[in-house]
Amino acid sequence: MKHTAGILLALSLLLTAAPIFGAAAPAVPSSTTTRWVNGGIAVDLVVERVSPIPSNSTGPLHAGETVRIRFTLTDATAAPLTALSPGAWVDPVQNPGAPTSESACTARIATFVGGGTLSDPALNLNSYVVATLNDDATLSVLDPVGGFGGTRLLTMVPLPAPAEDWVLTADQTRLYAALPTAGEAVLIDTASWTVTQHIPVPGAARVALEPGEQRLWVLSDKLTAIDLSTGRSTPVAVGPGPHRIAFTSDGRKAYVINTADSTVSVVDTGTLREVKHLPLGHPPSAIALSPLARAAYIASAADGTVTILDTEHDTVGATLTAEQGLGEIRFAPGGRYAVLLNPEKDLAHILDAAAQRIVQTGKVEKEPDQVVFSDTIAYIRHRGSENVLMIPLGKIGEEGQPLPVGDFPGGRAAFGAGIKPSVADGFVQVPGMSAMLIANPADRTIYFYKEGMAAPMGELENRPRAPRAVLAIDRSLREKSPGVYETTAVLPRAGQFDLAFFLPAPRLVHCFPLRVEPKPGTTTAPIRQVAIEPLLDGLPGGHLTAGVPAILRARLTDRATGQPITGVSDLNVALVATGTNWSLHQTAIARADGVYELPFQVPAAGVYYVYFTSPSLGLGIQGKPTLVLASAKGEGPR
């Protein structure tokens, strides 16, 4: 990841220099500012709860609450420091009762950046996670930051039914998904990855957020608008569906194509009323708006026409003619050029909104069905091929010239082989990188492609589930306004933490104290830094063999004191077989001197990830296994 790589490089320089010291900061209470000043640079930290929001939102922070973490950076003149790349981590203090020195803070950050099984912080605020919309009634959340390859499952989100579409809010804290067979849309909190709201909408097939995100629009055979501040659902009277929807950039108008009666409805989003109902003369299949041209472009698969609708006066204008079978149409960044696909004829067109005509056409792979843009490239997915077509955006628009294309393999099987992709995007740009994540449902894998390469550089397995769509949820500190960098997170279990802040240039390091109280009505033991030492003496002959009983042992010690941790009754062990659906979840048995053991045997040869979790010790799955075991073939169970 580019952001983390930059932190690693800068930190390597920092560790060879003298540490920078600043004034000590008090513990950070809820919704108040803590200031730290060094060398004329002020760092103001605010940690404020997002949810749940009680009547008294200024009280202490509690375990499990979703919070917004905000750093404001200014210079000696109070001018904001912009375009920086700060990093931050939250982890239990190593020496309770004493402030963390800058040298100790620097050393701790070095372990976070360097990685390793025992160096995962309680919260990493410099990462992103990958979410997949699966073929079953689940979403997967995967961790790509520690490196691609194999299973890196963080959590699963069970749903009442399979999802068909989803949409993410601009701040990436809420994810809405459409569940057609359940007759509802659901709201998923992306910090806790839990379903927090069920919105009944019969036949919900697609979801869209209007600009400003005041309302969620749910498309089925009908159209429903949900006010996100009140939760009120309002049916919107338009023509018969199925529907597609597009909004003006100010969000004041929505354009809804009505397939069954070959019309388009213009909806006032303030009154939720149809203000115009315009005939098209042919059944529409897709719609896209160009703010630059102030026009909507409506494609028809039936006769190969593209109708241009003036969005200032809401009148039907010119009609462009292509060929039967038109499908998806989307505008590239800037709003001048659109890519128009034809999955029946295996064609891609470039439509120039300034010239109001199709200026380039090219033959592509079999059944192109989706186009997604990075900052510089249009990526085209094909149902009938595993190849991904790339069109450099800087080279399009030269009328009559061949379409400039390149390609790379997006997996081993065609994207539409066996499992239908979702209507949601199957490709997404990696936050902060010139790279893409490619969901191939037939391969049950997410591929990582870096622009300029001939093939993907890595992959994330999602087996046994098929990823029909993919999202990248950015957890890093992002600049929301000049000099203001923030992100959201779920607070870990109660205790005293360091919120470690690192700025590569100008070079600053500081650990802010952060106290998290137990959830109301609960108590908790003090957090201990736990070291887990796997012991492999329980494997016959020192090897793991399929079908042969074995014992997995591990010793737990307190890293602060070096003393064994005994009497833990909730130490759970999870063994997960990569590439299969097999897993084992069982509580370990406590023995003497902090040693815990688990009798087990694996069913087949393969690679097995071992995770240790304990609510009482604050141990959770951080994406990296504690241990990786390889099993050889055996003679079967004895």
Image (cartoon, rainbow, N blue to C red):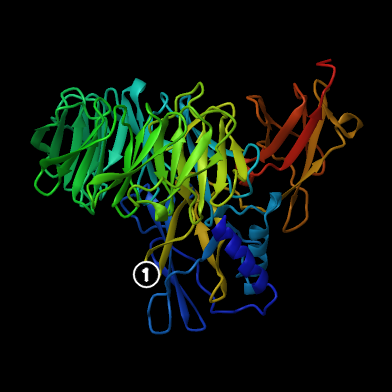
Residue furthest right in the image: 541
Question: Is 149 left, or right, of 29 in this rendering?
Answer: right
Please tell me which residue lies in front, 61 or 456.
Answer: 456
Quadrant where the image shows the N terminus: bottom right
Q: Position of residue 356 (x, y in %)?
A: 22, 47
Please tell me which residue lies in front, 551 or 444.
Answer: 444
Q: Position of residue 434 (x, y in %)?
A: 51, 54
Query: Where 136 falls versus 116 (above or below)?
Result: above
Q: Residue at x 61, y 69 (%)?
A: 10
Q: How many marks?
A: 1
Quarter residue 209 falls in:
top left
Looking at numbered disc 1 in the image, what kind of residue is underneath it?
Answer: Pro
Question: Is 580 left, or right, of 559 in this rendering?
Answer: left
Q: Residue at x 49, y 56 (%)?
A: 432
Q: Position of residue 4 (x, y in %)?
A: 58, 59
Q: Position of residue 74 (x, y in %)?
A: 42, 76
Q: Is residue 193 visible?
A: no
Q: Residue at x 46, y 32 (%)?
A: 382
Q: Is residue 608 visible?
A: yes
Query: Where 345 falls versus 596 (above or below)?
Result: above
Quadrant where the image shows the C terminus: top right
Question: Is 101 left, or right, of 41 in this rendering?
Answer: right
Instruction: Report which residue position mark 1 lands on.
Output: 482
Helix, strand or loop status at disc 1: loop
Quarter residue 200 falls in:
top left
Query: Where 168 falls versus 219 (above or below)?
Result: below
Please tell me which residue lies in front, 136 or 22.
Answer: 136
Quarter residue 588 falls in:
top right
